[in-house]
Amino acid sequence: MSNTKPNPAKLDFSGITWEKSSFSGGNDNCVEVGVIGDLVAVRDSKRPDQTPLVFTRGGIGALLAGVKAGAFDHLPG
């Protein structure tokens, strides 16, 4: 597993199967994720034509661990 920062401009997103949370209620106001090789792509469902954000699996894992641990609870929501 690589932790090298990916360049989204050099990736082909056409083959990704995008998934959204079951909590989204089926609307287009959520975040979608998809796997591209050993990377995780994230996009806004309202703007599917924009270049997605791309993270290494280690990077997205660290983000999710931080969220679960409450590291961002101080931010306004």
Image (tube, helix red, strand yellow):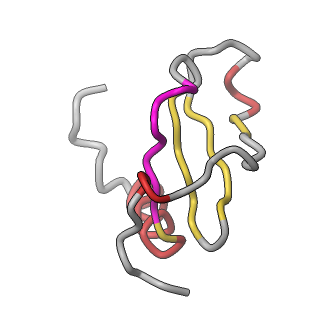
Identify the residue shown where x is 73% and y is 17%. Answer: 25
Residue 50 is inside the magenta segment:
yes
Image quadrant where residue 36 sits: bottom right
Residue 23 in percent (x, y) is at 70, 28
Q: Check the image and report above or below for 29 versus 41.
A: above
All told, the count of numbered labels is 0
Q: Position of residue 53 (x, y in %)?
A: 43, 47
Side of 58 where 27 appears, left or right: right
**Picture quarter with the C terminus:** top left
Magenta part, dominant SS:
loop
The correct choice, above or below, for 17 with respect to 43 in the image is below
Q: Nearer the viewer, residue 16 or 68?
A: 16
Residue range highlighted in magenta? 48-55
Q: Quadrant of the N terminus?
A: bottom right
Among all residues in the image, which is located at the extreme top?
27
The picture places residue 39, in percent across and down from the top left corner, at 57, 66
Q: Residue at x 53, y 45 (%)?
A: 42
Q: Residue at x 36, y 53 (%)?
A: 70
